[in-house]
Amino acid sequence: MQSTVDLRNILKRIDGRGYKAYKEIKGQYSFDFFSLFIDHVQGDPFAAPSKIRVRVAQSAVSFPAELLRSPHRKLGLADALIRIIDQNIKKVARLHRGTGKSGLIQIDVGSQEILPRTALKITDSFFEARMEIGLPARGRTILGQHAEAMIFNELPFIVEQSLFYQNIDQLKVRQFAEYVENYFALQKQLKEKGLVALIADDAILPRESGISSKPLSGTQAIPFKSPEELKISLSLPNPVNGQSQITGCGIPQGITLIVGGGFHGKSTLLKAIELGVYPHVLGDGREYVVTVPDAVKIRAEDGRRVEKVDIRSFINHLPGNRNAARFCTEDASGSTSQAANIIEAMESGASLLLVDEDTSATNFMIRDARMQALVHKEFEPITPFIDRVREMYERFNISTILVMGGSGDYFSVADTVIMMKEYKPQVVTAEAKKIAEQLNTNRTFEREFEWQTITERSPLPESFNPAKGKKEVKIEARGLNSIQFGTSNIDLQQIEQIVDISQTRAIGFALYFLSRRWMDGQLTVRQLLERLQDFWKTEGLDSLNPLHKSEEHPGNFAQPRTFEVAAALNRYRRLRVRQIKTD
Ligand code: ADP
Ligand code: MG
């Protein structure tokens, strides 16, 4: 490790020279109260910024041991610290220090969700923040004095004000740590209590706008109130406002229907449940909307590719002799895409499906008596969802929450019916069942055969080629919902449970990682995802990018769920699989 004097000397020497001379500062430097690692130096002021790490000894920052007591507390603490670092960066970093990204300092901070991420690592001996800086230049001429100001004034200020316990908002970090522990404790209780989701009383579900994940402001939003029939209390390991119980609406396993007039808050409720698979920042309004971790949003997604999915339970006897047992298409229809989405979610281990009529294919969801009379079953390949949804629960233990304002046919198959009325939920199961008896739909149950198994698939590793041009590995997140993988583009536009571009990036690298490490044409999608999950549990996200050396800035990753990794795998247009025959 070099001294700060060495670093100052280099900066003085290269001042005014061409940008490439910055490469000399790569290395490790010992400051008074932290170590600085300059791992990667950018090639020019417009290139991706340089990668650095700052490390402080745990003995020096004096955090109380109870904040580090469990992995969930550490996750909450790390997330709070990243947000504090981000705030302090905004206080001092000056973006106008020259050309391009000159003067930039940044850390990969999350938005409304709290996710494990590489931006801050906590070990038994140190805290390490992984950041980026834009080394300053005018044109391509190094501005050494500006670099000195960034590294010797701004950076130490940020470290001192963000990573030392005596200098930070202690209440905030404690609340984050305790909250994340609460969230996961509740999630664990759901399964034990036969529930799939909890929506706490007073939760704020609506968002500011269709393009913002911030809460709708206090006066406009109507807080959630649980109907009496579904009210439950779950215990919290850390009391909130002096309460060690949280009360709210517990949605039971089985088939739950959310009905109600248009614009009465049905989709908003479902959306909150969808994202309840993640803890949320304090103040979000959805902190205590908690969903089982294996809940998957299902929708129609015409245009997607499908690779050898056995969709016969939903769609069979396709025209033109297409094989529904190993259904392939480069351009799925609404109904076939929705069928494939369900089978793939089951294959990946989902225990709860979330379906909204707004984004479903009508012919996949319902086929009423009149249509059954006109279009005879032998000319209709589709077995609608309504005729499978109970079987999915009874045979495979997969629950469904379904928003359906348009068809009462579903009353017959639902266990619980919730009606949204002016954003207030009511339980109307008994009325719905009575109506179902009185007003017969006259439709015929159209299941052609009993659903025996899910046909599993094994991805072939040779389908994954991340090379592009001279680059052996070119994997990039292009926005939240698109991954460049080699020369291919993976479209994740309809994958609604990805919430952070660093998850998207991680998904891209996870595919590569899976293909190199475990894919062998034998292991199934499910087995591969389980290995990945175990690997993340023990190793974290640091070694996801194989191009980075182990003791370097690992790149900015946030942990995705394995369901979203599977979603990307299934939408990768070069995927080839082998079906595993179980019978
Ligand atoms: P639906 O699916 O029943 O047609 P939405 O869930 O799309 O209705 O909600 C309609 C509108 O009402 C949206 O603009 C949404 O933001 C707003 N909204 C939903 N829930 C609430 C609430 N609890 N308080 C205030 N506004 C809400
Ligand atoms: Mg809706």
Image (cartoon, helix red, strand yellow):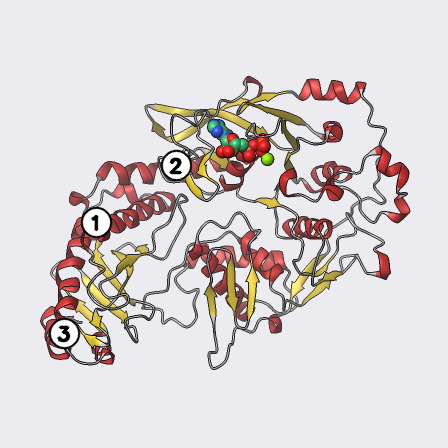
- Residue bearing the label numbered 1: 162
- Mark with earlier residue (3, 1): 3
Q: Is mark 3 within 8 Å of ligand 1?
A: no
Labels 2 and 3 touching (C-beta < 8 A): no
Front residue of 178/148: it is 148
Q: Which mark is residue 200?
A: none
Q: Position of residue 4 (x, y in %)?
A: 12, 69
- Mark with earlier residue (1, 2): 1
Considering the numbered disc 1 on the image, is that residue within a helix, a strand or a loop? Answer: helix
Q: Position of residue 437 (x, y in %)?
A: 79, 20
Task: Bin the neighbour count of mark 2 within 10 Å (Cα to Cα): few under 14, some 14-19, many 20 and up.
Answer: some
Task: Bin the neighbour count of mark 1 within 10 Å (Cα to Cα): few under 14, some 14-19, many 20 and up.
Answer: many
Q: Nearer the viewer, mark 3 or mark 1?
A: 3
- Residue bearing the label numbered 2: 284
Quarter of the picture holding the C terminus: bottom right
In the displayed structure, 537 sits above or below 429; it is below
Amino acid type for the residue under numbered disc 3: Leu
Q: Report how far apart the C-alphas of labels 3 and 1 lie in the structure.
A: 26 Å
Q: Position of residue 445 (x, y in %)?
A: 84, 35
Amino acid type for the residue under numbered disc 2: Asp
Q: Which mark is residue 11?
A: 3
- Mark with earlier residue (2, 3): 3
Front residue of 269/165: it is 269
Front residue of 101/346: it is 101
Considering the numbered disc 2 on the image, is that residue within a helix, a strand or a loop? Answer: loop
